[in-house]
């Protein structure tokens, strides 16, 4: 009787595990908490340019994660980022990056850089909900790293607050270079979310 009960318990446990989608096992997100209600407010369809009189590329390092409190801007564990998600007002061309940063001294360096990625933006900028676009990546991440992008312009922004929500570097930070001091800061949040497996 005990053997039958044990077998039934094991079978039930296996069914419960099988019912959980494989994509949710071990997945951890950080960066902005994106939902269809996350508006890229006061962003521009044409994208915000780098702000320091240079037409070249700049690096944006996210220092505060929109909608994700308590240190959600940093990677909570080591792992591999297999997917990133963005909400853009208009089309964007960018590279996804990972950075090590020292917020107190406003310095950072880039330790991962993707190939160029292209977001489409919102089909209807006047809609009440917003399209989340996802991209496959394969980035090794260490606990405490920050999300960043490299681009000439960006519309994956929510600009409704002040404060140093991003560190801006212009010209863009080199890959695997030393820590550099930010050219300035920006009050917009970067609407970028990463999923660690």
Image (cartoon, rainbow, N blue to C red):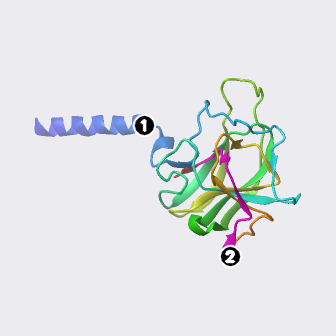
Q: Is residue 138 left or right of residue 125?
A: left
Question: Residue 155's image quarter?
Answer: top right
Residue at 61 percent across and 48 percent down: it is: 83
Number of numbered markers: 2
Q: Magenta segment: does it hold 65?
A: no
Residue at 74 percent across and 67 percent down: it is: 173
Classify mark 1: helix, strand or loop: loop
Q: Position of residue 90 (x, y in %)?
A: 79, 38
Q: Earlier in the sequence, mark 2 or mark 1?
A: 1
Q: Position of residue 116 (x, y in %)?
A: 78, 54
Q: Position of residue 39 (x, y in %)?
A: 66, 33
Q: Position of residue 162 (x, y in %)?
A: 64, 47
Locate the N terminus and report the quarter of the image it occupies.
top left
Q: Is residue 111 left or right of residue 91?
A: left
Q: Magenta segment: does it hold 190?
A: yes
Residue at 70 percent across and 35 percent down: it is: 41
Question: Residue 157's image quarter?
Answer: top right
Nearer to us of marks 2 and 1 is 2
In space, the residues marked 2 and 1 are separated at their CA atoms by 43 Å
Classify mark 2: helix, strand or loop: loop
Residue in the foreground of this view, choosing between 139 and 125 = 125
Residue 178 bears which disc, if any?
A: 2
User: Badge 1, how many Cα within 10 Å: few under 14, some, many 20+?
Assistant: few
Residue at 56 percent across and 58 percent down: it is: 80
- In the picture as drawn, the residue positioned furthest to the left comes out as 1
Magenta segment range? 178-194
Residue 20 bears which disc, if any?
A: 1
């Amino acid at each position: 009787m005990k053997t039958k009960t044990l077998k039934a318990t094991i079978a039930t446990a296996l069914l419960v595990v099988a019912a959980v989608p494989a994509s949710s096992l071990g997945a951890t997100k950080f960066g902005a908490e994106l939902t269809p209600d996350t508006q890229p407010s006061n962003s521009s369809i044409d994208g915000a340019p780098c702000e320091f009189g240079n037409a070249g590329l700049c690096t944006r390092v996210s220092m505060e994660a929109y909608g994700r409190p308590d240190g959600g801007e940093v990677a909570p564990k080591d792992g591999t980022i297999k997917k990133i998600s963005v909400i853009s007002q208009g089309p964007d061309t960018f590279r996804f990056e990972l950075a090590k940063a020292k917020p107190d001294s406003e310095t950072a360096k880039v330790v991962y850089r993707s190939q160029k990625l292209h977001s489409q933006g919102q089909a209807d900028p006047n809609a009440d909900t917003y399209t989340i676009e996802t991209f496959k990546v394969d980035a090794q991440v260490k606990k405490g790293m920050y999300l960043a992008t490299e681009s000439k312009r960006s519309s994956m922004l929510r600009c409704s607050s002040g404060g140093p929500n991003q560190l801006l570097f212009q010209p863009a930070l080199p890959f695997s270079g030393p820590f550099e001091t930010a050219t300035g800061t920006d009050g917009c949040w970067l609407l970028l979310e990463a999923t660690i497996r």
